[in-house]
Image (spheres, rainbow, N blue to C red):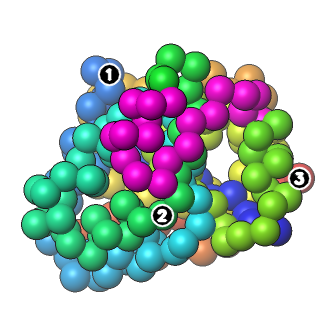
Amino acid sequence: MPRLVAFNQVTLDGYFCGADGDIGWAHKSPQDAQWNAFVAENAAGRGRLVFGRVTYELMASFWPTPAATASLPLLARQMNERPKVVFSRSLDKASVEASWNNTRLVRADLAAEVRKMKNEPGEDMAILGSGSIVAQLAGQGLIDEFQIVVNPIVLGRGRTLFDGSAQKLSLRLIKTRVFDNGNVLLCYEPTA
């Protein structure tokens, strides 16, 4: 049975994105061979990628492009080949299927669909970004692991990763890793 892992980056002051939704700060870390290898290794899985509409549109506007292939060929190939699921009530099926290969649009109940996917055979699934999806699924106890990268930057204002979460979520730290560029990976699993 596949696990569901949420991978996100936050700022030192706890923001998932800037007040205007900007996440460009997450891609401006100084070059670091360890960090680059970690990112490539993390993307090398073959399980489904899970997105909300906003993150999906951002990813679909970059990964299937010649610019992505030219600048990050291995990572682009991995991102483009993996199966993807986007949860949205506003996107239409034809545009989703045309914008990024191996993508399926789901309009059904988020928690019910994720429960169904977790009961199907396959490799672990990953949520990349998609803060509202993370908050909703965390509240339902459907995320098995949270991989949070703290970036050494302060935004001063923005949106936290668990905005909209209506309940307390207790987590247990299971792994840490410090990178030369100052990023710190913190891996947690729910305690209950």
Magenta-drawn stretch contains 98: yes
Q: Locate residue 97, reporting x and y percent.
A: 44, 40
In screen coordinates, is 13 left or right of 107?
left
Q: Which residue is drawn at the image coordinates 47% and 23% (left, top)?
A: 91
Q: Locate residue 161, reporting x and y percent.
A: 52, 37
Question: What's the distance in space between the residues labelled 2 and 1, CA to CA?
Answer: 31 Å
Magenta-drawn stretch contains 73: no
Q: Locate residue 136, reporting x and y percent.
A: 69, 32
Residue that extends furthest to the right in the rendered view of this protein? 192
Q: Which residue is drawn at the image coordinates 72% and 28% (left, top)?
A: 108
Quadrant occupied by the N terminus = bottom right
Circle 2: residue type? Arg
Circle 1: residue type? Ala
71 up-or-down from 139: above or below:
below
Q: Which residue is mark 3?
A: 192
Q: Which residue is mark 1?
A: 19
Instruction: Tell me, for residue 82, which label it has, or none.
Output: 2
N-terminal of the two: label 2 or label 1? 1
Q: Nearer the viewer, mark 2 or mark 3?
A: 2
- Which class describes the residues within 10 Å of circle 2: few (<14), some (14-19), or many (20+)? some
> Can residue 20 be seen here?
yes
Q: What's the magenta region? A: 93-111
Circle 3: residue type? Ala
In the image, 164 versus 52, the foreground residue is 52
Instruction: Tell me, for residue 101, which label it has, or none.
Output: none
Could you say whether the residue bearing mark 3 is in a helix, strand or loop?
Answer: loop
In screen coordinates, is 125 left or right of 26?
right
Mark 2 vs 1: CB contact within 8 A: no
- Which class describes the residues within 10 Å of circle 3: few (<14), some (14-19), or many (20+)? few
In the image, 55 versus 70, the foreground residue is 70
Could you say whether the residue bearing mark 2 is in a helix, strand or loop?
Answer: loop
